[in-house]
Amino acid sequence: MKIKYFLIAFFIVLIPIAVVANEIKYQDEPTKEAANLVTKYALSDDNAERDNYLKQLEEMAEKNPSNNNVRNMYANILLAERKYFLGLHQLQLINKETPKPGSKLTECMLLERTGKDAGDCYREAVSLFEKNNENDDNYVMALYLSNNPKFEAKKNELMKKGKLENEGENIFSLNRNELINSIFP
């Protein structure tokens, strides 16, 4: 049940939509179809149905390789299902063409979670955050995981501004493996 709420919340946040006159408008038809599959997946209690929806999302991602909305939805379900290698592959495809800081950070954490060296990836994520002037908790996470000397100063700066709560600060008291395993168990 927890996964359902997580997926529904993730679905609402990640799908680029415009609400016009109480009607949802999607960027394109594949995004709309994928969003419907994600909703069905999230609401289903039947494993066979869920597997079928996941398979349909996989086929949509293959059929629409340049549609990052579809690929993101597919990747998010893979990650929620702890299919980390498959989710990582989808994120790498997305980030190859249009890297975004948060997505790149997720890719880096998955690289590390799957036992691969992620040092260069974290440095690239930090660079993307800085290039986009994103100074948030994800940026601080990237600094922490890249062993960047700016970490403490940026963490303290966010705390003073009230943008990093105690629970955010506590996560940085975990060692690398504990932190990554808490996000990707």
Image (tube, helix red, strand yellow):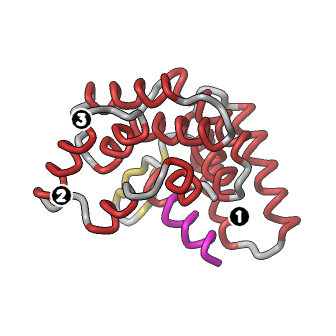
Q: State how far apart marks 1 and 3 are (Cα).
A: 41 Å
Numbered badge on residue 150: 3
The percent position of residue 85, horizontal first and vertical second, equals 72, 40
Considering the image in quadrants, where does the N terminus appear? bottom right
Badge 2 amino acid: Met
Horizontal side, residue 54 vs residue 177: left or right: right
Residue 106 placement, left or right of 140: right
Residue 159's tag is: 2
Q: Earlier in the sequence, mark 1 or mark 3?
A: 1
Q: Quadrant of the C terminus?
A: bottom right
Tell me which amino acid carries mark 3: Lys
Q: Which residue sits at x=77%, y=53%? A: 54
**Mark in front: 3 vs 2:** 3
Instruction: Write the start and end of the magenta stretch as one range.
Output: 1-10
Of residues 87 and 54, the one nearer the viewer is 87
Q: Quadrant of residue 143?
A: top left
Please say if 94 is above or below 136.
above
**Residue at image mark 1:** 41
Cα distance in 3D space between marks 3 and 2: 14 Å
Are the residues at dot 1 and dot 3 in contact (C-beta closer than 8 Å)?
A: no
